[in-house]
């Protein structure tokens, strides 16, 4: 099968291909700890389609750890407004996923920190990410009661803060044994012992066994091999929020002008 690496735009159900685009990761490197990065600027799709063959690791400090798919399990590359304008995102429909092979540089021991910008479209005990085997996994998922769960050999549960659907958020998870944590848009909602498993590879949109598949969209994934201090953590969250969630200045000005127009009409 012929494969092309390009940016793909989808408008009103039609497909438009534009000039191939590759952009370097500009996320904070947190002292050289940023080792894997995926965003919508570097995706390999099947020729003439928007079906994703590979989501390409742009950082490649651990060699290349591309997440791939095949057959009817391929998600779709689409463009949509994530909160501050149009971005290419990977659309997981509850029947597909992406998965690396064994990490090129071997298992990633704890501590590591994983950031994901994503949106749940519906909730049904599905995985945002996981490892690739039963003993080499760091997982973030929603439970049957739609609350979040983390797993790395032991499980912690949050029954009080359910996941939400229909909006992009910045998720951050630190896998650090007894002091692991999970944050949503800068607020910590889980903390505790999640186990001591290593991470042998990365499954995006499913668990390690290719089940529990996500119905939602993922815009960016960043993996840091190590723990982050407070300043580094906030800098990555700010980078992702500004890139995907916070309205651009021109958009905010237009919204303000629109509001003024409404006020004038009411007078």
Image (spheres, helix red, strand yellow):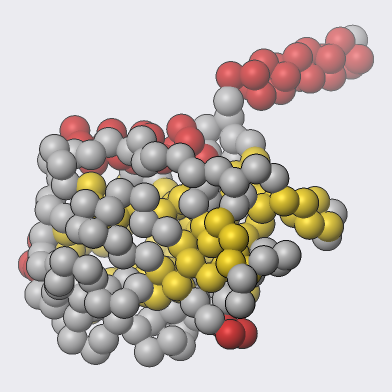
Q: Is residue 153 left or right of residue 54?
A: left
Q: What residue lies at 61% left-to-right and 50% top-to-bottom?
A: 7
Q: Residue furthest front?
A: 2
What residue lies at 84% left-to-right and 14% top-to-bottom? Answer: 261
**In the image, residue 158 lies at what x, y percent?**
32, 69
Residue 62 vertical placement versus 246 (above, below): below
Locate residue 189 relative to residue 152 in the image: left or right. right
Estimate the x, y position of residue 234 in percent, counting from the top left: 27, 36
Q: Nearer the viewer, residue 205 or 231?
A: 205
Q: Quadrant of residue 90?
A: bottom right
Q: Measuring from the top left, give residue 244's x and y in whole percent.
A: 51, 40
Quadrant that contains the C terminus: top right
The quadrant in which residue 38 appears is bottom left
Which of the pair 191/206 is nearer the observer?
206
Q: x%, y% of residue 44?
A: 54, 61
- Is 68 situated above or below 171? below
User: Quadrant of the rendered structure where residue 236 is?
Assistant: top left
- Identify which residue, 65 or 125, lies in the foreground: 65
- Considering the image in quadrants, where does the N terminus appear? bottom right
Residue shown at 83% from the left, 60% from the top? 13
| Residue located 55% across and 43% down the image | 21
Left or right of 91 on screen, residue 179: left
Number of callouts: 0
Q: Is residue 112 visible?
A: yes
Task: Report whether residue 184 is seen.
Answer: no
């Amino acid at each position: 099968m012929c494969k092309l690496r390009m940016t793909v735009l989808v408008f009103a159900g039609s497909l438009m291909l534009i000039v191939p685009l590759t952009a370097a990761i500009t996320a904070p490197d947190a002292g050289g700890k940023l080792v894997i990065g995926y965003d919508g600027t570097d995706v390999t799709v099947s020729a003439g389609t928007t079906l994703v063959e590979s989501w390409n690791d742009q950082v490649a400090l651990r060699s290349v750890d591309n997440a791939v798919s095949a057959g009817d399990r391929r998600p779709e590359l689409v463009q949509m407004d994530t909160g501050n304008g149009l971005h290419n995102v990977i659309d997981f429909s509850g029947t597909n996923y992406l998965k690396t092979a064994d990490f090129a540089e071997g298992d990633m021991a704890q501590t590591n920190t994983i950031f994901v910008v994503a949106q749940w479209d519906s909730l049904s005990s599905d995985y945002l990410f996981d490892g690739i085997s039963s003993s080499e996994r760091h997982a973030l998922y929603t439970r049957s009661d739609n609350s979040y769960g983390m797993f790395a050999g032991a499980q912690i549960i949050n029954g009080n803060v359910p996941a939400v659907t229909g909006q992009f958020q910045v998720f951050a998870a630190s896998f650090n044994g007894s002091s692991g944590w999970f944050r949503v848009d800068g607020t910590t909602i889980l903390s505790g012992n999640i186990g001591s498993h290593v991470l042998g590879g990365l499954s995006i949109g499913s668990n390690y066994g290719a089940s529990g598949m996500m119905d939602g969209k993922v815009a960016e994934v960043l993996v840091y091999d190590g723990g982050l201090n407070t300043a580094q953590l906030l800098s990555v969250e700010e980078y992702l929020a500004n890139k995907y969630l916070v309205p651009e200045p021109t958009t905010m000005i237009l919204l303000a002008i629109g509001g003024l127009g409404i006020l004038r009409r009411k007078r």
